[in-house]
Image: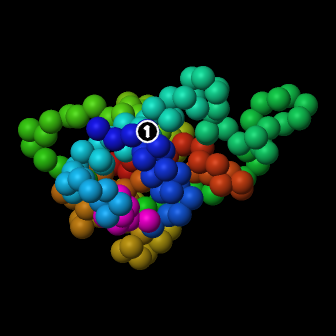
Amino acid sequence: LFHQDVLEFWHHLRLLTPGTSEQKYLECLSALSDRKPIDKKLFSEASKAFGYHHHLLDKRIKKIDKTSCRACINSETGKPECLACHIDGNFKLSKHLIENESKERSYFGNEIICDDSELNEIMEEVNRVKPRVQKHKGMCGNSEFKAAQEVSSQRKNLDVAGNMMGSCGHATIQQPVSVRM
């Protein structure tokens, strides 16, 4: 078991100083303590659970909506009105297709990343408005470059190729999605 102060300190340290190593933090705690070394896996799980409970406090009790930018709210209507959106992706967060994979329950469910069924509905709506054209063999737009292909042979064995996120000009993430192949 870990004291709440240790988990809260790690939570804030991780958020305020990106790139801080959890392993080094645990080594520092072990150096301060006379006890056995700290179980890294147990601490990692406790840290994730603490982060989730911190999120629940913000959402349910403090009523903080982290996907709504306060600066983008229209003063006349009181509704969010994002004037500009920046889309960015990270294709280093990939996940391979695994047969008979156990589906572990995520702490956050679909609160953070859009659910697959919701994403499929959005993709169907986009394809209804602008259907895919086979003329360019899956190329994006009028491009003749291989890098602009819609389907990559390098990523054919991946279930998730990465994450894409849209944010307003004030760096508030509106909705992240997993990029499916």
Farthest residue, direction right: 76
Left/right placement of residue 103 relative to residue 81 reads left
Residue holding disc 1: 4
What is the quadrant of the N terminus in the image?
top left
Residue 60 visible (yes or no): yes
- For the residue pair 109 and 116, the one nearer the viewer reads as 109
Nearest the camera: 26 or 52?
Answer: 26
Residue 114: image quadrant is top left
Q: Is residue 104 left or right of residue 74?
A: left
Residue 174 vertical position relative to residue 138 in the rendered view, above or below: above
Q: Spot the residue most to the front.
A: 34
- Magenta residues? 20-29
Locate residue 71, reporting x and y percent.
79, 45
Q: Position of residue 60 (x, y in %)?
A: 57, 23
Q: Is residue 22 magenta?
A: yes
154 in relation to 130, above or below = below
Number of numbered tags placed on the structure image: 1
Q: Compared with residue 152, is residue 113 higher up or lower down, i.e. above or below? A: above
Judge whether residue 43 is colored magenta. Answer: no
Magenta stretch secondary structure, dominant: helix
Across and down, in percent, residue 119 comes to 43, 37
Residue shown at 26% from the left, 56% from the top? 34
At 23% from the left and 53% from the top, the residue drawn is: 35
Residue positioned 51% across, 35% down in the render: 55
User: Closest to the observer: 4 or 103?
Assistant: 4
Residue neighbourhood size for the residue with mark 1, other residues' Cα within 10 Å, grouped as few (<14), some (14–19), many (≥20): few
The residue lying at 21 percent from left, 57 percent from top is 37
Residue 124 shows up from this direction: no
* Residue 133 screen position, x and y as percent: 42, 53
Looking at the image, the residue that sits furthest to the top is: 61
Q: Amino acid at mark 1?
A: Gln
- Residue that lies at the very extreme toward the left in this rendered image: 100
